[in-house]
Image (spheres, grey):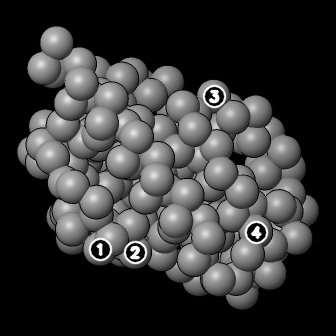
């Protein structure tokens, strides 16, 4: 693909275990652009996520998450790919930040069974994945909000190859559209 400065900021959203970080990293490699993972950024500056939940509760973690997005988004080059943690898109203030920075949101939609198989043993790293009944409820509650994303892709396969091909195609289309607008 031709990589232009007009290709926008691609933001992967979705539930824990949807593949945001894995797919995001691969997508950025295919697009030859920078990749950022919001959770990695949070941990780099503030420490391990389970400890942040432990020390400040979920609301304290959400404040740190918002602050980190606020710091990161203005620094991100275009094009680039950003993977959000599963709860970030749920906060209206974060959706507003994404809008302000022209983030194009992409929901990776994984069925509950796939999510469960990927996260059921990750409770140590993911405080919200410790109680699987509560996790299921969270999945149902959040999905309608994720569906507000600009683009939606199914993320059910183990092999992300076809998903990646679709995402690269989307990035090309968005880049072309932005370039067209910029030259009008
Ligand atoms: C969370 C998801 C996690 C991490 C934190 C909270 C959530 O990220 O941000 O544990 O609320 O869904 P992943 O979606 O990358 O697991």
Foreground residue among 105 and 67: 105
Neighbourhood count class around disc 4 (C-alpha, 10 Å): few under 14, some 14–19, many 20 upward: some
Which is more foreground, mark 3 or mark 2? 2
Looking at the image, is mark 4 or mark 1 earlier in the sequence?
1
Alpha carbons under labels 3 and 2: distance apart: 24 Å
| Residue 9 left/right relative to 169 | left
Residue 171: numbered disc: none
Give me the residue at 59% from left, 83% from top.
Answer: 124
Residue placed under numbered mark 1 in the picture: 29
Vertical placement of residue 160 versus 81, above or below: below
The residue wearing badge 4 is 156
The answer to whether one can see residue 57 in this image is no
Element type at mark 1 = helix
**Circles 3, 2 touching at the beta carbon (< 8 Å):** no
For the residue with label 4, is its CB less than 8 Å from the closest atom of ligand 1? no
> What residue appears at the point 73 percent right and 75 percent down from the top-left corner?
157
Which residue corresponds to mark 2?
26
- In space, the residues marked 2 and 4 are separated at their CA atoms by 16 Å
In the foreground, 9 or 180: 180
Q: Earlier in the sequence, mark 2 or mark 4?
A: 2
Q: Residues under labels 3 and 4: Cα distance?
A: 19 Å
Q: Are marks 2 and 4 in contact (CB under 8 Å)?
A: no
Residue highlighted by disc 3? 148
- Spot occupied by residue 143 in the image (x, y as percentages of width and height): 75, 41
- Which one is earlier in the sequence, the residue at label 3 or at label 2? 2
Q: Earlier in the sequence, mark 3 or mark 4?
A: 3
């Amino acid at each position: 693909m031709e990589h232009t400065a007009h290709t926008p900021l691609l933001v992967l959203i979705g539930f824990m275990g949807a593949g945001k970080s894995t797919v995001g990293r691969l997508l950025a490699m295919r697009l030859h652009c920078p990749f950022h993972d919001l959770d990695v950024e949070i941990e780099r500056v503030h420490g391990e996520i389970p400890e942040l939940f432990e020390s400040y509760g979920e609301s304290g973690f959400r404040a740190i998450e918002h602050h980190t997005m606020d710091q990161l988004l203005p620094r991100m080059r275009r094009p680039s790919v950003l993977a959000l943690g599963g709860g970030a898109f749920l906060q209206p203030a974060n959706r507003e930040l994404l809008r302000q920075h022209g983030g194009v949101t992409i929901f990776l939609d994984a069925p509950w069974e796939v999510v469960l198989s990927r996260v059921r043993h990750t409770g140590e790293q993911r405080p919200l994945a410790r109680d699987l009944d509560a996790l299921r409820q969270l999945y149902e509650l959040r999905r309608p909000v994720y569906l507000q994303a600009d683009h939606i892709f199914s993320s059910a396969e183990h092999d992300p190859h076809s998903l990646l091909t679709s995402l690269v195609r989307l990035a090309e289309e968005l880049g072309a559209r932005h370039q067209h607008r910029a030259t009008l």
